[in-house]
Every structure is written in structure tokens, then in C-alpha cells.
Amino acid sequence: MSDAVSDSTPRADAREVNFDGLVGPTHNYAGLAHGNVASMRHGGLASSPKEAALQGLAKMKALHEAGYAQGVLPPQQRPDLGALRDLGFSGSNAQVLERAAREAPQILRAVCSASSMWTANAATVTPSRDAPDGRVHVTPANLQSSFHRFLEPRTTGRVLAAIFRDEARFAHHPALPATPAFSDEGAANHTRLCGDHGEPGVHLYVYGRRAFPGEGPASREPQRFPARQTLEASQAVARQHGLDATQVVFAQQHPDAIDAGVFHNDVIAVGNGPVLLYHEMAFLDEQGTLDELRRKMASPLIPVRVPGEAVSLDDAVSSYLFNSQLLSDPDGSGAMTLVVPGECQENEAVWRTIQDLLLAGHNPIGEVVVKDVKQSMRNGGGPACLRLRVVLDAAERAGLSGRVLLDDALYGDLVAWVERHYRDTLTPADLADPQLAEETLTALDELTRLLEIGSVYPFQL
């Protein structure tokens, strides 16, 4: 482990690993996420947990076969019976579920949420290349802005600590205090920009509001939907990871975009290497954000701006164009591939923009790959929501614990696991079924053995 990373020598063996979240057995459409238009629109409909999980695995397998480093993160324990008991529901598991369904159906839906599938919200990660102690730094997001996600960080922390276990290479920080002042939504509001993954990076933190507005310049806030990320939370995570002022840019998300359903920055912008693909309404101070990035980046920034006249905010939200994965091609050529949901191809304006703007030869994006993740999209998460980006060098990849890097054997085992344990359909009424709770515990217990990560769930501790 190095003592410092002040030099600018690239790490040639550094690669970005996308850790996708496995869709959990209780995948359902409860419409819990206020401000997430797709989630609210599909609330109450029947879901297909098995199809959702297999769609996610198919995306992972396709990227693995194309040469990208692909990892897997397990889902949360759901239903969270412990949370129901903390809220005063008592008796047997069946009695707890029955009473919650009768007295507080929205709470029952919340404790059954499979939202941990969107691992872009799991944590914020700083590569060892940028950290002063030469370790990878990890902070689980507190997700305090919504009850169903607030339940996740404790288990998330255990899962990440089990996988990134080597203390010589990985540093774990506590989630920020779960208060509105430090509302943190993880990597969905964080982008690392650099020339190459192994070179020093600049970290773009995007926030929706200030918790203490009297301590800085006045800023406009959204009026229709809540701003989930605070400036103070982003600053705290950067401090935890040892980043200094030369390595960070804090930018406010445009409040009009939030009011249009852009609940996270990764719904309106995506970056990779030196490329920042963004909608003109992504940032409140667009030019100031770009100027600061240019001043601090060692390599030239390549901004790819999508104007509102080409893609409206409504089309951006409905298609999730910007919630795509932007990936550096594994051949080292510097070319990039954009992995978009099928909804982009179905939207004429969005698809035309992809062809005319992104593939015009003025930027490194040379290929677009379309993937079907409809089960996730209907609940408000696209390809980018489904993955946590972690830059690791060869020694760090070798130092991972567990069986979490996807290969053909692991893919086959996970598909068979899903086929054994997941239901074909699930309605909100099914969430009160005590048999569903038993099925999920059995499935998760088997999964921890399959992934070789040890005991990470409350029922295992």
C-alpha cells in the first residue's frame, strides 16, 4: 500500500468494475418513491420478480462477454420483519404481516421494497488512485429521504465490508447521520472524471439543496418534488475519503429538472473518463460547472451536451437516456459504448439524438447497445441505476473476498438460483403472505453460500 498518490503516474492495470444489484425476490410495484415518475406511475401493478432478476443477469452477462469487468451485489432481506417489529407490530411472523397489511399497508409495502437492486445508491466510492492513503474508500449512502430506502444502509455496509474486506486495500466509513441535513443518495449523485481510469480523477458531486442556506450563496430549490441530496452530505463524504479542493467540484442540480422527475443526477447526466454526457438542464450553473471541471482535470474535458430542443426533460425522464451506462471499451482504444434501455429506441426524438449527436464522430462514444430492463424501468431505474462503479487495480481485484466477479459458472448458478426461488408474478396483496417471507429467507441464505460472503443478513447474525 502506498503512502501517497501525489504523483500523476497512471495505473495501467486499473479497471472499472460495475457491481450490479441482483433483483430481490420481493420485487414489486408499490409506487413508494415520491419524485420518481416511473415508480409512481406503475404503483399497484403486478410485477414479475423472476423476469426482473433474469433481465438484470442477462445485462450483466452481455457486458461480461463483451470484456467488461462485472460484479454482483446481493439484495436486501425483505420483508424487513425487524423494522415492522420496531414499529410496534408483534406476534408471529404471520401475525406481524397480517396486522401490517390491515393497519398500515404502505408500511408493509415499504419493508418489502426491492429497491436495493439499484446499487448506484448503495455507496460512494473513491479509487485508491485518488485517496491520500492509497486505499479504496467506501461510504454507504444513508438514503434517509425515504423510509423504504433508509432501511438499507446497515446491511449494505455489512455486504460491502464482506466483499471489500482487506483493510490494507479498502477503507470503510460509516453512513452519514440519517438527518435531512446530511441526506445522501450515494453514487447516483457522484461522477468521477479523468483521462483514464488509472489516472488521477476529479469528483463531481451534484446536490439538490443546501441544508444550511445561510452559509453560502442563495440557491433556488425545486417546488414540486424534494431534492434528495444536500451539499453538506456531498462535502462530508469527500472529507471522509480525504479528497481536497483540487479534486472535487460541487454543482447544484437544476431545480426544474428535479420537478420534472429527475430525482438523481444520474437521470440527467452520465460521465466516464473525460466524457460528460448531460442534458442542458442538468446543472443550475452549467457553464460554471464545466469551467471548474476544466480547471481541475488533468486531461481535457469532453462535454457532450444534449439541448432541450432535441430531447425534452419529459423525454429524458421517460426514456432514461442519461441513466445509461457509459463504458470505456476493454480494448484500450479510448472508444466508449453507451448501454441504453429499450425505451430509448422506442422514443423517436431520443433515438434520433443518439444517432445524430452521440454517433457523429465528435466524441469517443462509438457504439450504442440496447438492453431490455423493463421490469426495473417500470419501477424507476435504468441500466445506470443497477450498478455501482468501482475502479480497482489488479491487486485490489485479486483482493476481493467472495465469489462476486461474474463468470460463466457464476452466471449459470445465479440463473438456476433465481429459477428455484423466485415467483413469476407478485401483487401488493401477496406481500402479506408469510410463505413469501419464508421463501425469501431460504433464497438469501442459499445466496450467501453461493457468493461465499458469509453471514450478512439480520436473520443470519
Image: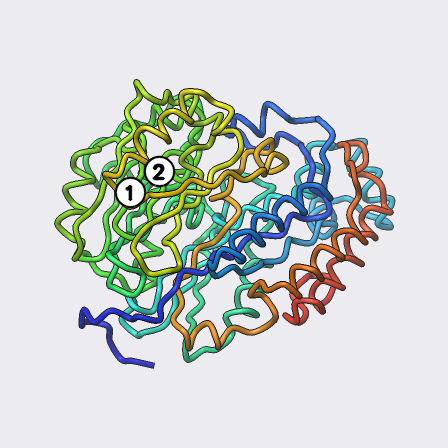
175 or 255, which lies in front? 255
Q: Of helix, strand and loop, which one carries label 1?
A: strand
Residue that lies at the very extreme toward the top in this rendered image = 309
Figure coloring: rainbow
Q: Earlier in the sequence, mark 2 or mark 1?
A: 2
Q: In this orientation, which residue lies closer to the viewer: 154 or 365?
A: 365
Q: Quadrant of residue 88?
A: top right
- Residue drawn at x 28%, y 59% is 196
Q: Amino acid at mark 1?
A: Leu
Is residue 461 at all visible to an observer of this figure? no
Figure quadrant of the C terminus: bottom right
**Could you tell me which secondary element the residue under label 2 belongs to?**
strand
Above/below status of 130 relative to 177:
below
In the displayed structure, 360 sits above or below 241; it is above
Residue 160 image point, x, y percent: 53, 64
**Which residue position holds label 1?**
276
Question: Would you place residue 452 above or below residue 111 in this image?
Answer: below
Q: Quadrant of the N terminus?
A: bottom left
Residue 23 showing in the rendered view: yes
Q: Amino acid at mark 2?
A: Ala
Front residue of 241/305: it is: 305
Residue drawn where x is 30% and y is 70% of the image? 12
Q: Is residue 405 left or right of residue 331?
A: right
Residue for point 48% across, 77% down: 399
Q: Residue 169 occupies which quadrant of the picture?
A: bottom left
Q: Which mark is residue 269?
A: 2
Alpha-carbon span between mark 2 and mark 1: 7 Å
Q: Which corner quadrant of the image does residue 225 belong to? A: top left
Are the residues flagged by discs 2 and 1 in contact, CB closer than 8 Å? yes
- Image coordinates of residue 277 in percent, x first then y, are 31, 39
Taking the spot 33% from the left edge, 61% from the top edge, the residue there is 332
